[in-house]
Image (cartoon, rainbow, N blue to C red):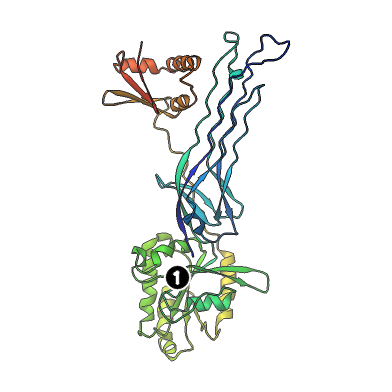
Amino acid sequence: MFIDKATIKVKSGSGGDGAVQFRREKYVPAGGPSGGDGGDGGHVILVATEDLSTLLDFRYRKEFNAENGGRGQPKDMHGKRGADILVRVPVGTVIFDADNGDVLADLSQGGETFVVAKGGKGGRGNARFASSTNQAPTYAEPGEPGSTRALNLELKLLADVGLVGLPNAGKSTLISVISAAKPKIADYPFTTIQPQLGVVQFDSGDQLVVADIPGLIEGAHTGAGLGIEFLRHVERTRILLHLVDLSGGPEGRDPVEDWKTINNELASYSESLASRPQIAVLNKIDLPEGQENLEKMKHFLEKEGYPVFTISAVTHQGLTPLLQYLQKRVSELPPPARYIPAGPRPAESIKPFEISKDNEVYVVSGAQIERMVDITDFENPESLFRFQRTLGRIGLNDSLRALGIQNGDTVRIGAIEFNFIE
């Protein structure tokens, strides 16, 4: 089964807590603090592999969690770092943030990796807080929590040539005779219900990757037929091979109108597709109906400025000049553009915190101050004192007073709430 879209949830490992330990050794009656740091949490890493051709695996597993870091140890020994988790995706997978739609990465080469969720840092042990004024600190930092995020994955096939046309134009037959691909072929619409990749091998050693895109009919860009599910795959091609059934099929269609139908769908889906280099390939010239429509169709296409080739995919007529042209033309075209990841979102303020009000509660937010909450042990008096002293140092207390806070009013920072006391 071909699956080209998936949504997953990932969570990096939390950092291990720092240790509170003191040296307890013979002949060392007043051993100092020796608690080691906690280990960092593991990352969640996406890696592109050529061994996969679909996102099918993500139908059965949708959550991926990295390992937490280990706690700090006595004798200044650090905790074990949490193991990373590698999530394998097919080459050509684009990763989007499910919450805001930003492009995070475009993994279009085998072996390419992207750290999608970084592990939390391990907390510092009490040995790190020893000073001339506090020679026996009894507190250590908790580890930072790991980050959780939802991702949308989209597979966009990587091919040199995108093969487009109405159902029954002969695309499956053509890809089967020019490559080693073995698609299902039959005389009814939507024989091909998933994209097919074929590799054309030339005597010179050159190769062309051709993608057969199924399901394009009138209204495909709005969801008619199968087209909306697969139009994304022609975005990755260098050139479009537009195959037209010159015979008009059993319904006696007008090949000129067939041509216009497909191009209207491509343009409606994406402006970049409308400007993609395109060649016209007129199929089924071995049929009498094909010969009848040939001159009219060639006149229309040449007036529009498209290169025109006439073939019969069944009898292999005209395939050699077509493939020679594709080999030369593709070598002249640049590779498909990669998706550009969104840069860091601009910070709303350079201040270490922002204050708002939720009814009678003063809500303090900001990455710096919320991280302080994460690494403070509120059960430890020394750690709590250090936290309170830091709030004064960064100006939070003064800012709250300026907003009219009174003794006993509630302040919320992250997941904690406390009463303001002068």
Residue at far bottom of view: 288
In the picture of the structure, the residue carrying the numbered disc 1 is 193
Could you tell whether 106 is left or right of 408 in the image? right
Q: Quadrant of residue 205?
A: bottom right
Residue 339 against residue 354 in the figure, above or below: below
Residue 338 against residue 244 in the figure, above or below: above
**Image quadrant occupied by the C terminus:** top left
Instruction: Give x and y (percent) for residue 58.
Output: 49, 54
Picture residue at 62% right of the left edge, 68% below the top: 207
Picture residue at 64% right of the left edge, 27% below the top: 78
Q: Is residue 263 visible?
A: yes
Report the label total: 1
Q: Is residue 266 visible?
A: no
10 Å crowding of disc 1: few (<14), some (14-19), many (20+): some
Given residues 97 and 236, the one toward you in this image is: 97
Given residues 145 and 49, the one toward you in this image is: 145
Picture residue at 55% right of the left edge, 75% below the top: 182
Residue 45 against residue 157 in the figure, above or below: above
Residue at far front of view: 26
Question: Secondary structure under badge 1?
Answer: loop
Instruction: Give x and y (percent) for residue 164.
Output: 45, 71
Q: Label 1 is placed on what type of residue?
A: Ile
